[in-house]
Amino acid sequence: MESFLIKGGNNLKGDVYVSGSKNAVLKLIAATLLTDKECILTNVPKLKDVEIMLDILRSMGSEIGINKQVVKINNKNINSNLLNYELVSKLRASIVVMGPLLARFGEVSLSYPGGDRIGDRPLDFHFNIFRDLGFVVEQDNKKFKIKKPKKLPRVDKVTLDGFSVTATETALMWAAGQNRRIELSMVAEEPHVQNLVQMLRGMGARIEVKPGHRIIIQGRSKLKGTKQKVIYDYIEGGTWIVAGLVVGGDITIHNLPVEDLELFIHRLQRVGADISILNKNKVRVKTSPSIKAFKIDARLHPGIASDLQSPLGVLATHCHGTSEIFDTLYSGRLNYLKELKRMGANVKILDVHRAHISGPTKLKGIRFLKKDDIRGGMSLIIAGLSASGETFIKNAYQIDRGYEKVEEKLKALGANIKRV
């Protein structure tokens, strides 16, 4: 098992390039299951989660060709009964294959998906979509099955139980494969949802995005192949912004979707962060010694994303005053703060959703930092880069799931980090 060894103290200087979005590409790969024609995805990041999702498709008989950042997928001869349950159990995003497989075959059987340990993430939102559509949902402790009855009732509108991103994507993909018009209400509107909408339109579905979290879809039973570019990862981009502020120096971040980070950047500038927007895809971040404490309330898009909450928790250790972190989405998102506390951070965890962090505090490197999720792991790397001494972070795999070539990008900026 590979790990990261970090020696803190080096400022970050130079240029860093944001990769394709993890949260987007996994759903675009799943969407290829809707058609028996070839689909081409570009700007695909090399991530462990991408490898697993492609292996899930291969287990069903997909033909996949990879040339650098271009992935060609042909699902002409797939058999959903061959789907590998063990692979599904490794990846939370695997749940989204439910929608396209139901659209194409009328039923699906899956093991429960795995992924980050950030608290309970029940699948009720997904199941209730199909219950409302008239499907039969069967569950046991290890797997679930959803199947279409002999006669499916005509349902023209489905209201989601909440703004779940993966439930929205699941519903979108199923609806795109139906030769009918259907309205989805209370949908999420994250950038990766919008990227999926672009792809489904390219496959032949007519989709209208309406105000008030509504989408109207006129699908097709026979969708065509398409070519779709994966959007750049605004979560990775926001993480590089925080890294520049915490570690210090002068970095320029390229391929950064500024529009998707409008509130995030604005709030940081408000408390004294030196962030210059150079154009719609590029920002410059410089040492900012006098950042004031802040209050962050993680929300769905266009609010500040929960995936950026843990980097902001590290930033709070360098701010003047007491910052408050509030994240209601998952009960385990604050676990990384226990590791920051071991590094010397002044942290008070109020409950599973709220914490106070006082600063500025000089962090010290420690060995064998643990991490339960991708974002928390990357945040501990940032903490180690700013700390005195050495920091040893176990299980590089967890970070490789969501950040492409992270140590190579950091080394190019002058960081002292190596994989061991």
Image (tube, rainbow, N blue to C red):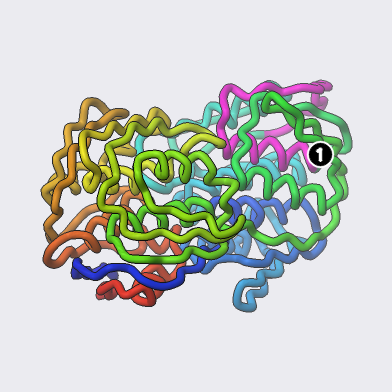
Residue 373 magenta: no
Disc 1 marks a residue whose amino acid type is Ile
Q: Is residue 22 above or below residue 414?
A: above
162 magenta-colored: yes
Q: Is residue 405 above or below residue 296?
A: below
Q: Which residue is mark 1?
A: 207
**Residue at x 37% of width, y 48% of height:** 273
> In the figure, is residue 95 to the left or right of 272?
right
Q: What is the x, y in percent for residue 343? A: 13, 51
The image quadrant of residue 121 is top left
Q: Residue at x 41, y 59 (%)?
A: 285
Q: Where residue 21 sits: x, y (%)?
A: 56, 56
Instruction: Provide the secondary structure element on which disc 1 rests.
Output: strand
Establish if 116 lies above or below 126.
below
Which residue corresponds to the image point at 28% horizontal and 62% vertical from the top-left?
395
Is residue 56 in view?
no
Specify the quadrant of the image occupied by residue 59: bottom right
Looking at the rendered image, the quarter that the C terminus falls into is bottom left
Is 272 placed left or right of 139 in the picture?
left
Image position of 336 (left or right of 283): left
Quarter of the figure with the N terminus: bottom left
Q: Residue at x 86, y 36 (%)?
A: 218
Q: Provide residue 321's location: percent of width, then percent of height.
A: 21, 36
Answer whether residue 78 is visible to the viewer in this image.
Answer: yes
| 189 lies above or below 381 | above
**Residue 345 drawn at (x, y percent):** 15, 45
Q: Is residue 292 rendered to the left or right of residue 129? A: left
122 vs 276, nearest the viewer: 276
- Which stretch did the figure color magenta? 147-176
Count of picture labels? 1
Mark 1 crowd level (few <14, some 14–19, many ≥20, 10 Å Cα): many
